Image (cartoon, rainbow, N blue to C red):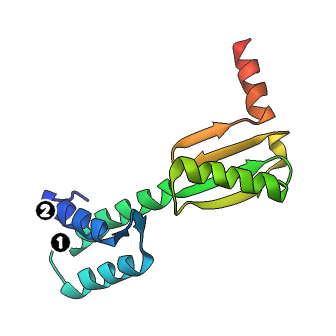
Amino acid sequence: MKIKKEAKREAKQLFCWCLVNGVLDENRVRHVVQHVVAAGHRDCPAILSHFRRLVKLELARHTATIESAIPLPADVRAAVEAGLASRYGPGLTIAFAHRPELIGGMRIRVDSDVYDGSVRAGLAALEQSF
């Protein structure tokens, strides 16, 4: 669907209204969606489509996935959380996952940033160098 500039501008303004101290407010997002649907504008689908895209990108920016070969002890989890919070700011949602196929180490993904310190990635890099 092709979105007009006006609809993108409106969606961006609504998105900016949903940010409180740089963090997305879930209640404001719900309120905006309800308001746009109730208003019944002709560009309602386009506005909501672009608004959804902006919200999805913002959520991805504030979501971290930490994968490790073994379950991490509480002190290591706390240290990783503190490091990520200082790097990416407040409001970061962190999820820990256990993936034995990494062999050792950990892999951290925040939006498009990937920090791969796993043995599997090291072996893959070594294999590619030959």
Q: Is residue 104 above or below residue 73?
A: above
Q: What is the residue that sits farthest to the top in this orientation?
A: 130
Q: Residue 41 location, x and y as percent?
A: 16, 79
N-term mark: 1 or 2: 2
Q: Is residue 69 above or below residue 20?
A: above
| Circle 2: residue type | Glu
Q: Is residue 23 above or below residue 108?
A: below
Q: Is residue 111 left or right of residue 24?
A: right
* Mark 2 lies on residue: 6
Residue at image point 29% right, 62% down: 50
| Circle 1: residue type | Asp
Q: Is residue 19 visible?
A: yes
Q: Are marks 1 and 2 in contact (CB under 8 Å)?
A: yes
* Mark 1 lies on residue: 43
The Cα atoms of the two marked residues, 1 and 2, are separated by: 9 Å
Q: Is residue 85 left or right of residue 70?
A: left
